[in-house]
Amino acid sequence: MVRCASLPCFLVIAALALGGALPAIAQTPYQGVLSFKVSCDADDRDNSSAVEGWGTDAWVSGLVRNLTAGASASAVAESGASVSTGAFGNATWLSPAEGVVSFFDIGWEADGVVSGNALAYQGTDWYYQFRATADGWLEIDYEMAGRGTELFGLNGFELELQGPGYWKFLSLASEPVGSLQYPLVDGATYGLKIKNWANIYGYLGSRTSYMDATFRWRITGGQPIPEPGALAMAGALGVAGLGWAPRRRRT
């Protein structure tokens, strides 16, 4: 039998009974990359009108820092038809176990393009490699939004967790907002990649198509943090424990 003679002991028992634990967030970071490559063609019957653009920012060897990158390209055909495409983003690490990735102005503008293309999905986009230092969870909350005269071709994003091989396509049309959770194993190395799939071929006509997205990710360990109601119950149990603490008998 466990005997307690003080309030702190009762609080510990109450917390254990509720099953709550603070997240174990220590991770070993290896590499972070933000890299975009785009291309466009105002007339795919004339190879001279194809143009590419790219931009990269990265850190390696655990030297974590925030990243910003972008790429753009524009092409004009002999007919006067034109198209431009771009992809931009920034990545913030609040710690090796938590951060935010934002993508913006991913898409294109076209004017009178009869047969061409606009491709914003040719880069790595965002990649983070790390080693888990405890069993836990990778949790991701995301939101995407499209804007412009025509959203066809923007598609959405793919998310891949390399190691266990988890992969999911997030559709801009049907899954613009959501949450994901994947298990992590102590000592295993993972690579998390988020990549846009914006591309369009053939008749572009005159249109404006862009999408933006934000991904908030965190790595937690242990059991979930108790809800506020559970914390209040823990406090009540601790206070009640005061009545159980043995008192010294006067002689």
Image (cartoon, helix red, strand yellow):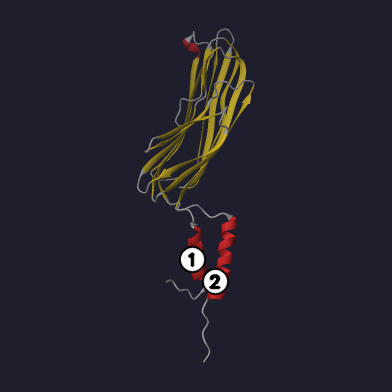
> Which residue type carries mark 1?
Ile
| Mark 1 surroundings within 10 Å by alpha-carbon count, few (fewer than 14), some (14 through 19), many (20 or more) | some
Q: Are marks 2 and 1 in contact (CB under 8 Å)?
A: yes
Mark 2–mark 1 distance (CA, rounded to whole Å): 10 Å
Q: Is residue 65 visible?
A: no
Give the percent coordinates (x, y) of residue 48. Answer: 48, 11
| Mark 2 surroundings within 10 Å by alpha-carbon count, few (fewer than 14), some (14 through 19), many (20 or more) | some
Q: Which residue is mark 2?
A: 241
- Furthest residue toward right: 149
Front residue of 192 and 238: 238
Q: Is residue 69 visible?
A: yes
Rendered image: mark on residue 13: 1
Residue depicted at x 59% and y 61%: 232
- Furthest residue toward bottom: 251
| Numbered marks: total | 2
Give the percent coordinates (x, y) of residue 12. Answer: 49, 66
Residue depicted at x 58% and y 61%: 233
Give the percent coordinates (x, y) of residue 50. Answer: 49, 15
> Which residue type carries mark 2?
Gly
205 shown above or below 88: above
Quarter of the view holding residue 83:
top right
Q: Is residue 170 left or right of residue 183?
A: right
